[in-house]
Image (cartoon, grey):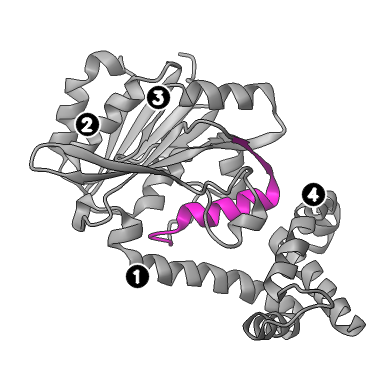
Amino acid sequence: MAHPLVSIVMRTKDRTILLRRAIADVIAQTMSDWELIIVNDGGVPQPVDDLLAHYATGLAGRARVIHNETSQGMEHASNQAIEASTGTYVCIHDDDDTWHPTFLETTSRLLEEDDTYAAVAVRTEIVLEKLTDTAVEEIGREPAWPEIHRFSLTELMSQNIAVPISCMYRRSVIDELGGFRSDLPVVGDWEFHLRLAVAHDVAFVDGKPLAFWHQRRSQGGALGNSVFAGADKHAYFDLKVRDEYLREYAEKNGVGALLFIAAMSKRGGTFGAPETAFSFAVRQARKGVYFVRSKRQIMSQTGESPLAYTLTRIGRRVSRAMHRR
């Protein structure tokens, strides 16, 4: 039996009203060479099985489900499904989000035609909605990250710039990077994107939105979005990831440059020009995106991680700027 071109990962737990929409959304794709792997992460099994039976004709034998008796977390569920997948490319379609019908066709064609890209992200639109007793009601739309026009390591240093519904990845690259970190209950996609952008080029399809990030900002509990319902958890693990990478840098290079950047950013100091320490670091990081790619041989010889290598170079440039003042 031939392997599908795309494996679609769908994580869910006791959200039948949303899962129904998500399954129908996959079936509506113009590209049909896919498999759907649903991970029911600690939810009641029967409603999920019933939905698969209901959509059996449209799914045409291309879907299967993994039932976890207890919840193992979002990133563990992603890794579970990826390990069970057989496609060349992988997408994560959360149970509350949707795609434009041409999403799979557009993104898979780009990766098929250009093997220099490890993944592709697309222009994304936020769909604001609320739940009624029997349906999901749309209440508005707004662009997600309208200022973003490329998948950039520089921008990722500040925030995630693509949610799972926005992306398609090469399965081989996911394996190379070690998958998603199952120890992170949230922000796992951002942390993965950091590692991805350090190691590889990622394409960006601009223009009309091809992915739709659905948000229920006032909804709590299982039917809410983790970024809103679990805002405190997001803040905690965002800082945890930043501290881990800073610690890696500081252990190898000391904290001198970091202390200077922190102090200058608070005091609004300049480096010989009307520029903050943060904007200077960002400008150097943009250059760093290019020298990381050209210095991979050096990094492989020293055993230094790409991110630590980038931070080292930025620190040296900051030190030189200090001495020139």
Distance between mark 3 and mark 1 Cα atoms:
35 Å
The quadrant of the rendering that contains the N terminus is: top left
Q: Please give the label number shown on residue 16.
A: none
CB atoms of marks 4 and 2 within 8 Å: no
Q: Earlier in the sequence, mark 4 or mark 2?
A: 2
Q: Are marks 1 and 4 in contact (CB under 8 Å)?
A: no
Q: Which mark is residue 35?
A: 3
Badge 4 amino acid? Arg
Looking at the rendered structure, which numbered label has been put on residue 20?
2
Point out the image quarter for the C terminus.
bottom right
Alpha carbon separation for disc pair 1 and 4: 36 Å
Which of the marked residues, 2 or 3, is nearer the chain's N terminus? 2
What's the residue at 32%, 56% (across, down)? 226
**Viewer-nearest of discs 2 and 3:** 2
- Any part of residue 42 in sight: yes
Using the image, tell me which numbered label, if any, was put on residue 293.
4
Mark found first going from the N terminus, 2 or 1: 2
* Front-lying residue, 118 or 22: 22
Tell me: residue 16, above or below residue 318.
above
Task: Point out the tag, 1 or 4, that comes first from the N-terminus.
Answer: 1
The answer to whether one can see residue 83 in this image is no
Q: Which residue is mark 1?
A: 232
Q: Amino acid at mark 3?
A: Glu
Q: Give the residue displayed 35% in from the left and 32% down from the top.
A: 37
Residue 6 in the figure: left or right of residue 52: right
SS under mark 3: strand
In the structure shown, which secondary structural element does the residue marked by tag 4 occupy?
helix
Above or below: residue 138 compared with residue 319: above
Q: Which residues are magenta?
A: 184-205
Magenta stretch containing residue 203, yes or no? yes
Tell me where residue 74 appears, x and y as whole percent.
36, 51
Mark 3 burial class by Cα count in 10 Å: few <14, some 14-19, many 20+: many
